[in-house]
Image: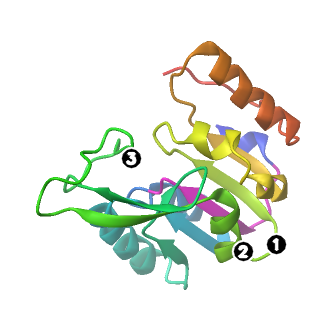
Amino acid sequence: ELFKEMQLPRQLRLLDLGANGGGFPLLCFDLGFEFSALTCVEVNPFTHSRLSLNIRQNIGLRPKLLNVAIGGHSREITLSFPSGGTGFSIYGAKNGAASEDSIIEVLTLDEIMHRGFGDGVVDLCKMDVEGAEYEVLLGDSAESLRRVHYLVIEIHAAESARRDALLRKITDHGFERIKTSTA
């Protein structure tokens, strides 16, 4: 439904934050879009492997597929990962006790945008980062959001003041609410 509300070019510059197995870029591809640039971010290394296979097998371009987390400031974190699933959050993950821990790089939105698109624009950004949207967008490292034409975002539950601040920040960056779903 949202695609009907957006005026997107057929040659799409897409940023998928919280890409999981690559369903959103595959949906875009199925809808007839081609990619002039594609950057996908997925923190879970097991899920990132599926993402890599799905995108490279079905789309076949040279996308940037980053196995990193997104946050409000750069750092490294140690996390234990489940072998799959769609709702992994860096906040709910077990911190550093199992033998299968991974050290994960956390990048800001500005850093991810620079790696994926240089100083260029992004036609569409999908953000489903399981609660990290507050840290990412309310911090000081999200100025590159101004170079995004459309933002499709899942906003997770938070106290009303924090949620209101996030919505204000998005509006201040020039976005208008097209549709809201409360599923």
Residue 173 versus residue 61 in the image, above or below: above
- For the residues labelled 2 and 1, say whether their Cβ atoms are less than 8 Å apart: yes
Give residue 120's mark: 1
Q: Which three-letter amino acid code belongs to the residue tagged 2?
A: Phe
Q: Does the magenta stretch include residue 15?
A: yes
Crowding around mark 1 (Cα neighbors within 10 Å: few <14, some 14 to 19, many 20+) is few
Give the extent of the magenta segment.
7-19
**Residue in view at x 39 percent, y 79 percent:** 57
In this view, the residue farthest toward the left is 99
The quarter of the rendered structure image containing the N terminus is: top right
Give the label, 2 or 3, closer to the camera: 3
* Label 3 residue SS: loop
Find residue 106 and report its horizontal and vertical position in percent.
49, 61
* Label 1 residue SS: loop
Q: Mark 3 points at which residue?
A: 90
How far is disc 2 from disc 1 in space, using C-alphas? 5 Å
Give residue 117's mark: 2
Picture quadrant of residue 29: bottom right
Picture quadrant of residue 78: bottom left
Crowding around mark 2 (Cα neighbors within 10 Å: few <14, some 14 to 19, many 20+) is some
